[in-house]
Image (cartoon, grey):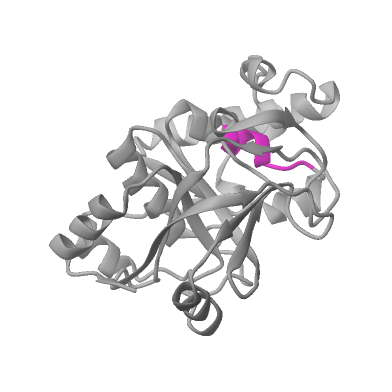
Amino acid sequence: LIGEVSPWLIASQTHEKSLQNKFGIKIKHILWNELKHYGDMEEKGILKESFPTADQRKLTESEKVYELILETVNSNAADAVSVECFSMVKEHKVTACLALAQLCKDGISAGCEGDIPSTVGLLLAKEITGSVPWMANLASLHSEQGLFAHCTVSPDLIDSVKTPTHFETNEGLAVQGEFKGDAVTIFRFDESFSKMFLCETEIINRPKYKTACRTQIEVKLDKESVHKLRENPLGNHHIIVPGHIQNELELFAHFKGIEVI
């Protein structure tokens, strides 16, 4: 965990003992001021292949953020990383969106805003499918559909890759694209890893609303799922996995004593 858990997140202050007991995962907490300044990192051009049309000056900044996070992951032999990035945006007007997207493309489970339950979800889905899926905000709910959106996503998961500014701050670079495929599995752990929201569904729209984060999907949801997400959400972020892995996740939950809701 680099930085802190973002204070506005719902149910994301992880019970570290529960995490270690359930999965054998330990959290190493590293503050930003314990790391090098991102500006001191050497640019190696890794992001240029994934984001060839990005603004060059801003891409250079994102490259250095990527190198800093990657060096931190490697030096700590970490299996995953969650980054509290808003403080960096506020102080330096540079985002971690492209850096985290590239790390996910590299096969490193990289989550946003210090959200540990979602980052563990990324790690689990990668173990099942072989690739890191998408961590996205639940942006809105209607009677039979939900909108999920976020400003970072692995470029391998989207078509028509663009790099506008970050939605909430209008700073730096974010990742926008059209999510590939139609079938998805959506899940989320609670902060104590005793419950898991889980459903399989289909994408019905790939909008570009100006009122939500840059990459967006609308999915079908049955009335029961809408009720659970509205009345008793387990958190802001959910994991969007291409394809059907509900059976595998249910088996994992049964084995680990996790209630599927």
Asked if the magenta segment contains residue 95, the reply would be yes
Residue 223 location in percent, x, y?
Answer: 50, 76
Q: Is residue 116 left or right of residue 92?
A: left
Q: Nearer the viewer, residue 204 or 49?
A: 204
Instruction: Tell me how many marks there are.
Output: 0
Residue 51 location in percent, x, y?
Answer: 70, 23
Residue 111 visible, this angle:
no
| Predominant SS along the magenta part | helix
Q: Residue at x 53, y 57 (%)?
A: 114
Q: Nearer the viewer, residue 204 or 251?
A: 204
Residue 205 location in percent, x, y?
Answer: 66, 50
Examine the image and state in which quarter residue 154 appears: top right
Above or below — where is 100 with respect to 202?
A: above
Asked if the magenta segment contains residue 130, the reply would be no
> Which quarter shows the C terminus?
bottom left
Q: Is residue 142 left or right of residue 118?
A: right
Residue 61 visible, this angle:
yes
Q: Residue at x 52, y 66 (%)?
A: 221
Range covered by the magenta-colored residues: 94-101
Q: Residue at x 60, y 60 (%)?
A: 137
Q: Is residue 38 left or right of residue 9?
A: right
Q: Nearer the viewer, residue 235 or 222?
A: 222
Examine the image and state in which quarter residue 180 appears: top right
Residue 260 location in percent, x, y?
Answer: 29, 70
